[in-house]
Image: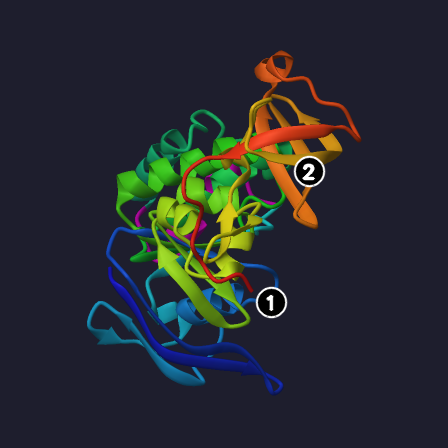
């Protein structure tokens, strides 16, 4: 199911949250809405779901104008951050709830519940109460409950925010696998850049109600169109170069005793496989990354000087 947003505006008590927004999402895509708090991403998701009324603009599912349709008429399903499971029902009963409401027969419900328990790797746990499950398992139940209804559009409202880092990584892989297997057009709201890059076919970067950039994850990271996108999508080192400023990612700052550039080490953070170093350079700070297994190749000290080279041509964007 294609989704088309056309010239959408939305305000809360005089404060404009969405500003003349237009966006096309192709059938079968998983598109991430990414941006800081207050950028309008959740507002847009709720407009697509019908949970907020259309104030100005148009929304199409395929070639059908659904701008004024109530939520129950749109064949959508949403996966929430809070899971929104029924605590008094078992896992299987939670998944079956929407099927019963739609009038499915008992044998059909049993077959579908069993199938989706297997899809989300919860086979044999249908009898358990949801309180007996881990956070990751509860999110799988919420995902199965949404997907079993075979919606035209699947919406995710920061679904992994309540999970620890290891579970978030595991679940985002599962969500992408299941979404690709089902082919359901999906819109995924997150403020986590890494999550968006890992899960999405395309990323929509938003700021103050406007779309800043739309592109595939590699495009948005390596070819940001402005300073906001460059800074939001990762650490940006601004280096004065001939003809203006250029932005270099930390992985493009290569420490070397024969490097062409020199700065003082302000701080060092050991992050497992990566060491992160803050360096004073050109009256600002440059952040470099290097793999921990290479620490012995060039020893550095806090307060001491370090040399480095700039790899590549940098990112040529205007810096806000």
Tag 1 secondary structure: loop
User: Where, quadrant-wise, is the N terminus in this rendering?
Assistant: bottom left
Name the residue located 41 percent from the left edge and 46 percent from the top edge.
222
- Give the label, 1 or 2, closer to the camera: 2
Q: Which mark is residue 131?
A: none
**Please, which residue is most extreme toward the right here?**
303
User: Label 1 belongs to which residue?
Assistant: 38
What distance separates the C-alpha of mark 1 from that of mark 2? 32 Å
The answer to whether residue 299 is left or right of residue 186 is right
How crowded pointer 1 is (Cα within 10 Å; few <14, some 14-19, many 20+) is rated as some
Tag 2 secondary structure: strand
Name the residue located 33 percent from the left edge and 58 percent from the top edge.
153
The answer to whether residue 174 is left or right of residue 308 is left
Residue closer to the observer: 34 or 51: 34
User: Label 2 belongs to which residue?
Assistant: 279
Residue closer to the observer: 142 or 114: 142
SS assignment for the magenta stretch, majority: helix
Question: Magenta residues, as a range?
Answer: 88-105
Q: Is residue 25 magenta?
A: no
Tell me how the rendering is colored. Answer: rainbow
What is the x, y in percent for residue 303? 80, 31
State which tag comes first along the sequence, 1 or 2.
1
Number of marks present in the image shown: 2
293 w.r.t. 285: above or below = above
Name the residue located 54 percent from the left edge and 82 percent from the top edge.
11
The answer to whether residue 148 is left or right of residue 208 is left
What is the x, y in percent for residue 135? 60, 36
125 w.r.t. 180: above or below = above
């Amino acid at each position: 199911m294609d989704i088309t947003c056309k010239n959408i505006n939305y305000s809360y008590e005089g404060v404009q949250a969405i500003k003349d927004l237009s966006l096309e999402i192709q059938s079968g895509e998983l598109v991430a809405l990414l941006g800081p708090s207050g950028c309008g991403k959740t507002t847009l998701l709720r407009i697509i779901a019908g949970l907020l009324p259309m104030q100005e603009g148009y929304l199409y599912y395929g070639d059908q104008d659904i701008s004024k349709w109530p939520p129950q008429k749109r064949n959508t399903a949403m996966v929430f951050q809070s899971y929104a499971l029924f605590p008094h029902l078992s896992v299987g009963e939670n998944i079956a709830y929407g099927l019963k409401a739609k009038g499915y027969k008992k044998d059909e419900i049993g077959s579908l519940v069993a199938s989706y328990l297997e899809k989300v790797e919860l086979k044999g746990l249908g009898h358990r109460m949801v309180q007996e499950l881990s956070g990751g398992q509860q999110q799988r139940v919420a995902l199965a409950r949404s997907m079993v209804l075979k919606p035209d559009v699947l919406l995710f409202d920061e679904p992994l925010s309540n999970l620890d880092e290891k579970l978030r990584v595991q679940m985002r892989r599962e969500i992408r696998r299941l979404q690709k297997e089902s082919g359901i057009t999906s819109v995924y709201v997150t403020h986590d850049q890494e999550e968006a890059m890992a899960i999405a076919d395309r990323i929509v970067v938003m700021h103050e109600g406007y779309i800043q950039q739309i592109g595939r994850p590699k495009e948005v990271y390596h070819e940001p169109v402005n300073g906001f996108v460059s800074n939001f999508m990762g650490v940006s080192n601004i280096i004065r170069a001939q003809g203006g400023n250029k932005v270099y990612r930390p992985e493009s700052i290569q420490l070397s005793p024969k490097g062409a550039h020199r700065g003082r080490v302000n701080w060092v953070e050991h992050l497992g496989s990566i060491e992160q170093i803050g360096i004073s350079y050109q009256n600002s700070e440059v952040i470099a990354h290097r793999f921990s297994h290479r620490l012995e190749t060039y020893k550095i000290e806090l307060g001491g000087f370090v040399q480095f080279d700039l790899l590549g041509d940098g990112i040529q964007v205007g810096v806000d």
